Amino acid sequence: MSNFRLPLWSLMLAMMLVLVSCNPDDEDVNPTKVQNVVHKAIYDVMNDWYLWNLNMPPNVDLTGNMSNQEFLEQLRYTRLDRQGWTYITTQEAFRAAFTGQVSGAHGFRMAMDAEERLFIASVIKTGPAGQDGWQRGWQILEINGKPISEFRTSTGYRIDTGPNDVGVSNTFKFKLPDGSETSRTITKQSFGANSVAFEDVYEIQGKKIGYWVYENFRASPNVTPTKSLEVEESFQKFMAQDIDELVIDLRYNGGGSVDVALQILNYIVPASGDGKVAYTYRYNEKQSTNNRTTNFTKNGSLSLDRIVVITSRGSASASELLINSLRPYMTVVVIGDNTYGKPVGQFPLSSFSRTLVENNVEVVPVTFSLANARGEADFFEGFSPNQMVGDDLTRNWGDTEEARFAAALNFIVNGNVSARMLNTYYKPKWEMIDQFEGLEKEFPMF
């Protein structure tokens, strides 16, 4: 979960730092010494902005030969800052990820069922897999001739598709829903990723029910102010059809832009929430004057008393912000599995250091937490679902028999979920979000 906007005083401070920094011509060009200077810059911005800066070690070695990420790991407050939340990347990679510019991926997600069978869980329509016609519900039998059982480790599974580089190829053997088998060889490419995997409106017992599968809070490129044109198009369709209920499927949504989350919230929140608190930023003690509240600005004509959100452990960050922000104003019914538990967010800090800018090092630590209107912020254990239902990986998006979607419809129509649907629940042995770290954890895909 990230927010690109900084207060005016912060931007002025960043400019001042650039002006007063030392001249790079005066610095020793010895690679080890340059690395040490970078480490010092990382420490300084972390000391200023890291949410848990008071828990950083007081003494760290700035003269070692470790990588920037290894150095950053020394500073991380591991009790609350989980592996992969605070990370190093480049400025270009950060900007690209939050606007859907993917490089070195096939463009699909995987998930495992109760029998430890691996399936395509979702497909990015604009990526290589989507262009090749891959679908949710295809069972993956082999990857490069290796059966899935051979990817098992002592702690679960680690699915290997090679480095995330353009040109890397993999061959997958699938079992299709009709029982036939097929093999496909596919190459990792660069592409612009869409975030809406599926949308439709269902008329059931006199109710118009919108179903929206949303997989990442990504902004559209070159759009100011920051927003998603996909989101705008989806909600225009839902408003045009005057839906009575909305099911939002966030089961593989690892987060993304807070600004895009707010865009969605403003469409969903009841009119009674207009102008009221959506969430409040909380920074560390050094930056407490930067704490601020964001209010709802109701957008559009949707008039919803409740929403149903489908979740899994893969629902993190901005997905959880959406749930938490709406709870004070409307009924939010959660169906599926426990969410990830990331009530904190980040923004990049290179603008506060000339050294980081010149070395193209983007430090993205946890810098703030977000509280809802009731002050609720510390959901590190995630949100427990109202109804625990298993992920039916054999069925494609929009299939009304798919367990979690069927449970959502059942709840809307009957006010409860049948015991038969509740009996589908299982705890997966492997979940995709746990295999990724850093920037890729927020936008996980293979």
Image (cartoon, rainbow, N blue to C red):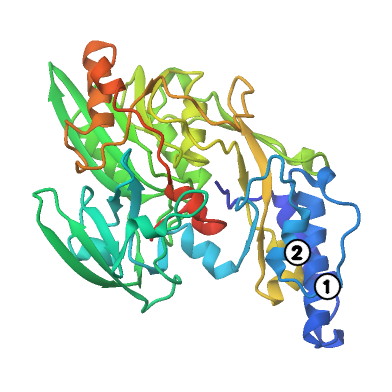
Task: Give percent across and percent down for residue 381.
Answer: 58, 31
241 to 395, vertically: above or below: above
Question: Looking at the image, which is closer to me, 319 or 11?
Answer: 319
If you read the primary sequence from the N terminus, does the residue marked by circle 1 or circle 2 appear first? 1
Q: Amino acid at mark 2?
A: Phe
Callout 1–callout 2 Cβ contact below 8 Å: yes
Q: Is residue 12 in sight in this rendering?
A: no
What kind of element bears circle 2?
A: helix
Crowd tier of the residue under label 2, counting other residues whose Cα lies within 10 Å: few below 14, some 14–19, many 20 or above = many
What kind of element bears circle 1?
A: loop
Question: Looking at the image, which is closer to me, 219 or 442?
Answer: 442
Residue occupying the far top of the picture: 415
Question: Looking at the image, which is closer to me, 194 or 43?
Answer: 43
Q: Which mark is residue 64?
A: 1
Q: Residue at x 13, y 21 (%)?
A: 204
Question: Looking at the image, which is closer to me, 197 or 313?
Answer: 313
Task: Give percent across and percent down for residue 95.
Answer: 52, 63
Q: Which mark is residue 71?
A: 2
The alpha-carbon separation of the residues under discs 1 and 2 comes to: 9 Å
